[in-house]
């Protein structure tokens, strides 16, 4: 009987120890994953405070497409970082099928609008693949942002003289 009590107490000790180790490991893994995701977001500019609003018309907004849009458009946060300090920026992205009855050609459509201080930037792109259309919009918007930044810097330099 004494031996059974000893085994039961050992088993209780073992389960308590197991639960403590398990909770500690879960906390370590959670903090490591959150720090890795923050590092990834910071390093690649993935949605750095800019709100991205996605609208899908005549197409299902799957989680993979949503993640793709957020990843690609989030990179723009690097180029407009200083404007985020002035106020919260929102990027409106619309993805859609251009027509319901066509099956070939440029049937997918992507459009993005970004409101910056003093100007609203808009870009659109048609393609047969939705991801290529999203990339096209990102490239056009990135080019427009660089032009906008150049104009703003020229205005600031003129005012200083």
Image (cartoon, rainbow, N blue to C red):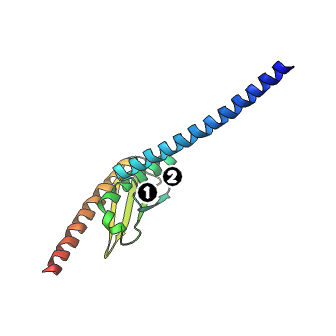
Identify the mark at residue 17; answer none if there is no mark: none
Q: Which residue is drawn at 28% across and 59% down?
A: 142
Q: Note whether residue 74 is visible.
A: yes
- Residue 126 placement (x, y as % from top left): 35, 55
Q: Residues within 10 Å of mark 2 (few under 14, many from 20)?
A: some
Residue 86 vertical position relative to residue 33 in the rendered view, above or below: below
Of 122 and 59, which appears nearest the observer?
122
Cα–Cα gap, marks 2 and 1: 9 Å
Residue 24 vertical position relative to residue 12 in the rendered view, above or below: below
- Residue 30 placement (x, y as % from top left): 53, 44
Q: In which quarter of the image is residue 83?
A: bottom left
Q: Residue at x 24, y 68 (%)?
A: 148
State the quadrant of the N terminus. Answer: top right
Q: In which quarter of the image is residue 24?
A: top right
Identify the mark at residue 95; answer none if there is no mark: 1
- Residue 138 placement (x, y as % from top left): 33, 56
- Going from N to C along the chain, the mark reached first, 2 or 1, is 2
Q: Note whether residue 130 is visible.
A: no
Marks 2,1: beta carbons within 8 A: yes
Q: Residue at x 29, y 55 (%)?
A: 139
Q: Mark 2 points at which residue?
A: 61
Q: Residue at x 22, y 72 (%)?
A: 152
Is label 2 in a helix, a strand or a loop? loop
Q: Which residue lies furthest to the right in this view?
A: 1
């Amino acid at each position: 009987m004494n031996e059974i009590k000893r085994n039961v107490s050992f088993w209780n000790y073992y389960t308590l120890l197991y639960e403590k180790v398990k909770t500690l490991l879960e906390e370590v893994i959670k903090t490591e994953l959150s720090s890795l995701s923050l590092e990834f977001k910071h390093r690649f500019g993935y949605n750095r405070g800019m709100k991205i609003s996605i609208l899908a018309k005549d197409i299902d907004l799957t989680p993979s497409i949503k993640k793709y849009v957020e990843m690609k458009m989030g990179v723009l946060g690097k180029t407009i970082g200083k404007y985020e300090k002035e106020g919260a920026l929102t990027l409106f992205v619309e993805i859609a099928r251009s027509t319901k009855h066509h099956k070939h050609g440029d049937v997918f459509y992507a459009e993005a609008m970004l409101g910056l201080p003093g100007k609203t930037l808009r870009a659109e792109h048609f393609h047969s693949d939705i991801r290529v259309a999203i990339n096209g919009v990102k490239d056009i918007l990135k080019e427009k942002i660089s032009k906008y930044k150049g104009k703003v810097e020229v205005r600031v330099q003129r005012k200083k003289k």
